[in-house]
Amino acid sequence: MKATVSRKAHFNAAHRLHNKNWSLEKNSAVFGKCNNPNYHGHNYELIVSVTGEINKETGFVIDVAILKQLIEVEIEAAFDHKNLNLEVPEFETLNPTVENIAVVIYNKLKPKLQSTLELEITLYETPRNFVRYSGK
């Protein structure tokens, strides 16, 4: 029997959407106010979902305490109250769009899970704008 276990978390972070290869005019036209040279912030809401077989001995897909710890160490500690462009190494050359942030989160968590478990990241940048990523 398979089931999906999800854990919610959040972090606050600043970023600037900007392509270094474009002119200021093109960056402004494409990214609008998200291209503010002084950055801007979001209160990100994160849902980490793990799918797998229910262990017959424990009744768990994954121990939620372990999932909570992974999120705190790998994501919240790395992203919370940070300027993603300046303080998070993964975004040194990668534009920190909500899509790219979700992929980075996936790539940080997936190697920490048993290989038989599936992972899906849902990341809300605003209450109405979010992305889902499952490694595909």
Image: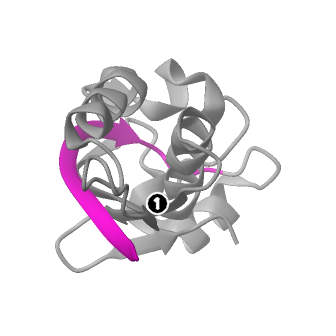
Relative image position of residue 103 (x, y in whole percent): 59, 54
Question: Considering depth in this image, is 108 or 44 the residue closer to the camera?
Answer: 108
Residue 114, located in which quarter of the rendered image? Answer: top right
Relative image position of residue 71 (x, y in whole percent): 33, 35
Main SS class of the magenta portion in the image:
strand
| Point 61% across, 22% down: residue | 89
Q: Amino acid at mark 1?
A: Val
Question: Considering depth in this image, is 19 or 104 the residue closer to the camera?
Answer: 104
| Point 50% across, 56% down: residue | 102
Question: Considering depth in this image, is 96 or 39 the residue closer to the camera?
Answer: 96
Q: Which residues are magenta?
A: 1-18
Is residue 15 shown in magenta? yes
Relative image position of residue 44 (x, y in whole percent): 25, 52
Residue 63, located in which quarter of the rendered image? Answer: top left
Farthest-out residue, front: 57
Relative to 101, is 43 on the left or the right?
Answer: left
Relative to 55, is 16 on the left or the right?
Answer: right
Identify the coloring: one colour
| Point 56% across, 36% down: residue | 108
Farthest-out residue, right: 21
Q: Residues within 10 Å of mark 1 (few under 14, many from 20)?
A: many
| Point 46% across, 40% down: residue | 37
Location of residue 72 with respect to 107 vertically, above or below: above
Kind of element beneath mark 1 = helix
Q: Quadrant of the C terminus?
A: bottom right
Q: How many marks?
A: 1
The residue carrying mark 1 is 98
Relative to 119, is 116 on the left or the right?
Answer: right
Residue 46, located in which quarter of the rendered image? Answer: bottom left
Is residue 45 shown in magenta? no
